[in-house]
Image (cartoon, helix red, strand yellow):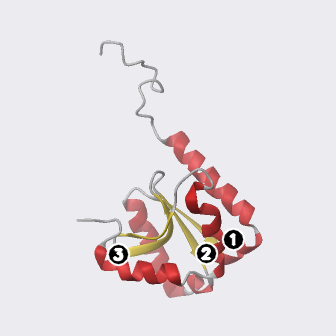
């Protein structure tokens, strides 16, 4: 079963891209086109969910939460959603609209910090980085 960008979510993704709020647009303007060294997609579907931003190379989801995310039903929904995303091997980081609006540079730094921690924790497949040149007999 296809998990990423399923066709049945295409219209919903497209609508979400058209209706991004000003805070999401602000963050997108700093993530797009690899400006922070990594390619991000916006309004990307993962299973039954559509995430705000997704970095495929780092398997990282970024969510920007407005006021409605703090209502009891929404908190429970977000917990289930994050659990599903993590079960797919994705990292999830969340920021509030206020954090993005008032501290954009801090948000970008937190994203970069999260990516660097992910890189440090990921074992390399490179023979050189594993201490082998590829010429040794195994």
Q: Is 85 or 14 nearer to us in this picture? A: 14
Q: Secondary structure at mark 2?
A: helix
User: Which residue is under mark 2?
Assistant: 24
Please tell me which residue is depicted at 35% across the width and 69% down the height of the picture: 5
Q: Earlier in the sequence, mark 2 or mark 1?
A: 2
Residue depth check, mark 2 versus mark 1: number of the one nearer the observer: 2
Q: Upstream in the sequence, badge 1 or badge 3?
A: 3
Residue at 53 percent of width and 43 percent of height: 119
- Disc number placed over residue 48 in the picture, else none: 3
Point out the image quarter for the N terminus. bottom left
Q: Position of residue 81 (x, y in %)?
A: 43, 72
- SS at mark 1? helix
Q: Split into 4 quadrants, where in the image is the C terminus? A: top left
Is residue 29 among the parts visible in the rendering?
Answer: yes
Mark positioned earlier in the residue sequence (3 or 2): 2
Circle 1 packing at 10 Å, graded few (<14), some (14-19), many (20+), is some
Q: Which residue is mark 1?
A: 100
Label 3 packing within 10 angstroms: few (<14), some (14-19), many (20+): some
Give the residue at the far front of this rendering.
33
Numbered mark located on residue 129 in the image: none
Asked whether the viewer can see residue 76, the reply is no
């Amino acid at each position: 079963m296809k998990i990423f960008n399923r066709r049945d979510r295409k219209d919903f993704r497209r609508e979400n891209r058209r209706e991004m709020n000003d805070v999401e647009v602000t963050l997108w303007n700093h993530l797009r086109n690899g400006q922070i060294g990594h390619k991000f997609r916006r309004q990307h579907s993962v299973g039954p969910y559509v995430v705000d931003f997704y970095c495929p190379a780092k398997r990282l989801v970024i969510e920007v939460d407005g006021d409605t995310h703090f209502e009891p039903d929404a908190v429970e929904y977000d917990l289930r959603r994050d659990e599903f995303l993590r079960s797919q091997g994705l990292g999830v980081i969340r920021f509030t609209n206020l954090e993005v609006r008032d501290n954009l540079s801090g948000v970008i730094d937190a994203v970069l910090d999260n990516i660097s921690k992910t890189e440090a924790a990921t074992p390399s497949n490179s023979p050189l980085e594993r201490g082998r040149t590829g010429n040794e007999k195994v």
